[in-house]
Image: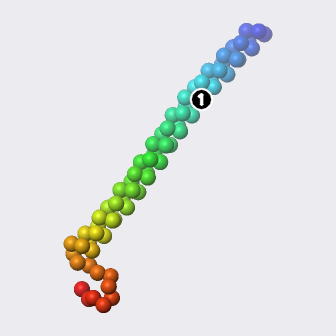
Amino acid sequence: MERLGAALGGLAFTVLVLGGFVAIRVLTRLFYSVVLFIETLSLAAFALLVGYVVYRVLLGGSDDPRRSD
């Protein structure tokens, strides 16, 4: 009975350690995907800003209602 308890304790410890590694791996991959998503959104916002500046400055677009293009 003592050996069975020790075996179950060892098995529980092994599952705990392995589960910890799996949990850390899942959390780091989740964090990595969140960072990539935020980076993609930031890059899209920057591209929109550059496109707006190109439209306004280089192509002479105006929002002024008194001025007709």
Residue occupied by mark 1: 19
Q: Residue at x 33, y 65 (%)?
A: 49
Q: Residue at x 48, y 39 (%)?
A: 29
Given residues 37 and 60, the one toward you in this image is: 60
Residue 52 image position (x, y, % from top left):
30, 70
Q: Does dot 1 land on a helix, a strand or a loop?
A: helix
**Image quarter in which the C terminus is found:** bottom left
Residue 22's quadrant in the figure? top right
Looking at the image, residue 31 sits to the left or right of residue 56; the answer is right
Q: Is residue 61 above or below residue 38?
A: below
Q: Residue at x 43, y 52 (%)?
A: 38
Kind of residue at badge 1: Gly
Given residues 35 and 64, the one toward you in this image is: 64
Q: Residue at x 34, y 60 (%)?
A: 46
Residue count near mark 1 (Cα–Cα under 10 Å), binned few <14, some 14–19, many ≥20:
few
**Image quarter in which the N terminus is found:** top right
Residue 11 image position (x, y, % from top left):
66, 19
Check the image and name the residue furthest to the bottom.
Answer: 66
